[in-house]
Image (spheres, rainbow, N blue to C red):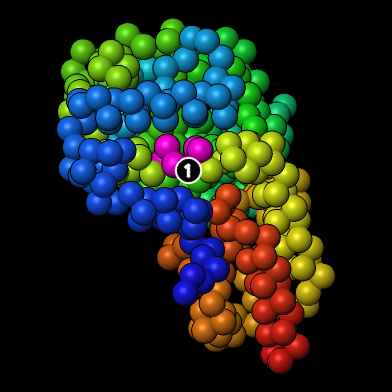
Amino acid sequence: MRVFNFSAGPAALPLEVLEQARAELTDWAGTGMSVMEVSHRGTAFTALAQRAEARLRALLAVPAGYRVLFLQGGASTQFAAVPLNLAAQGARADYLNTGLWSSKALEEAGRLAVQVNIAADEAASRYTTVPAPAALRLDPRAAYVHYTPNETIGGVEFPYVPDTGAVPLVADMSSTLLSRPIEVGRYGLIYAGAQKNIGPAGLCLVIVHESLLGRARADIPTMLNYARMAESASMLNTPPTFAWYIADLVFEWIERHGGLSAMGERNRVKAERLYDAIDASGLYRNPVARECRSWMNVPFTLVRPELTAMFLAEAHAAGLTQLEGHRSVGGVRASLYNAVPLAAVQALIEFMREFERRHG
Ligand SMILES: Cc1ncc(COP(=O)(O)O)c(C=O)c1O
């Protein structure tokens, strides 16, 4: 029995993808082996890797001049890889601080001898806002500007792409990539941990403009060096082959279901319905400013917090699972990634209304 899964990651995967993986688990692509048992340098896997990259490029309409890397270590490894690849020791970099993930990224850069300029800090709103475009204190000499378009824990999302002029824009799109169309050409570098809209944990996508390759510090670990990874088609060492394979199936599923425009439209409707239900209720509250509410992660609290544990337990019993807020903030969080159907959101809304009738 499949439940409705609202996890923030590892998040729900499309059932069609899981069924295809199950069907070909023991004999993949006519090899007589599972995809986990074949050489990553053999013809079958090399073809898969090329196909996955081509599908991703087509879905995102990646312009010429970008390299696409399939890496390991999750998004957190990129917190270190970005400064090591793009900023010389002591160089300046701008960071927009809009919540827990952006603050982790900037702390890591600070540890790696980057002079971090906090070009915006939303602490005063308790990270329920994003800075206005005119409020960004950008340094024109910065090596790059880093931001987090969607803060997965706070449920805060930028409704605009910062204009950084000639300074490369770097985005942690872990909770953004493949949720809707984006304009890749606005970015110097995009990275995303896979375990939300892309595939299983263990894979991290990096899309980087070629002009940013070759700037790495001399002492950078080889495995973090984008130029080396690009030269070797992301196969300097043994890549996470199973995760890469599932990502390819997910890309194919997105294609089959109308591409990123269709995903974006579905995601907008899902989020709107849930926010409307929260705003219309007397029991549930979402603290985020309306213009920057996330389509992917909808955190909310109960005005009677003593009911939260009962809410979560009853929701779980009703087949609405992994609704717990992040361990750092508590409360409730419904993550609405691509594989979460509208029916799941409708079931959640009905459960919330019914719970409120009984306890509100
Ligand atoms: C926006 C964002 N950045 C970074 C991370 C960290 O990702 P990972 O666990 O792959 O290192 C997460 C994880 O949820 C995230 O949501």
Residue 215 located left or right of residue 102: left
Q: Which residues are magenta?
A: 247-252
The residue under the point 53% across, 43% down is 253
Q: Residue furthest bottom?
A: 358
Residue 118: x percent and y percent? 51, 32
Residue 297: x percent and y percent? 59, 55
Taking the image as drawn, is residue 127 in sight? no
Quadrant in which residue 185 is drawn: top right
Q: Which residue is nearer to you in this view: 29 or 181?
A: 29
Any magenta on residue 218? no
The residue under the point 59% across, 22% down is 61
The residue under the point 79% across, 63% down is 276
For the residue marked with disc 1, what is the amino acid?
Val
Would you place residue 9 above or below residue 260 in this image? below
The residue pinned by badge 1 equals: 250
Residue 293: x percent and y percent? 69, 50
Other residues around mark 1 within 10 Å, as few (<14) / some (14–19) / many (≥20):
many
Quadrant that contains the C terminus: bottom right
The residue under the point 58% across, 58% down is 340
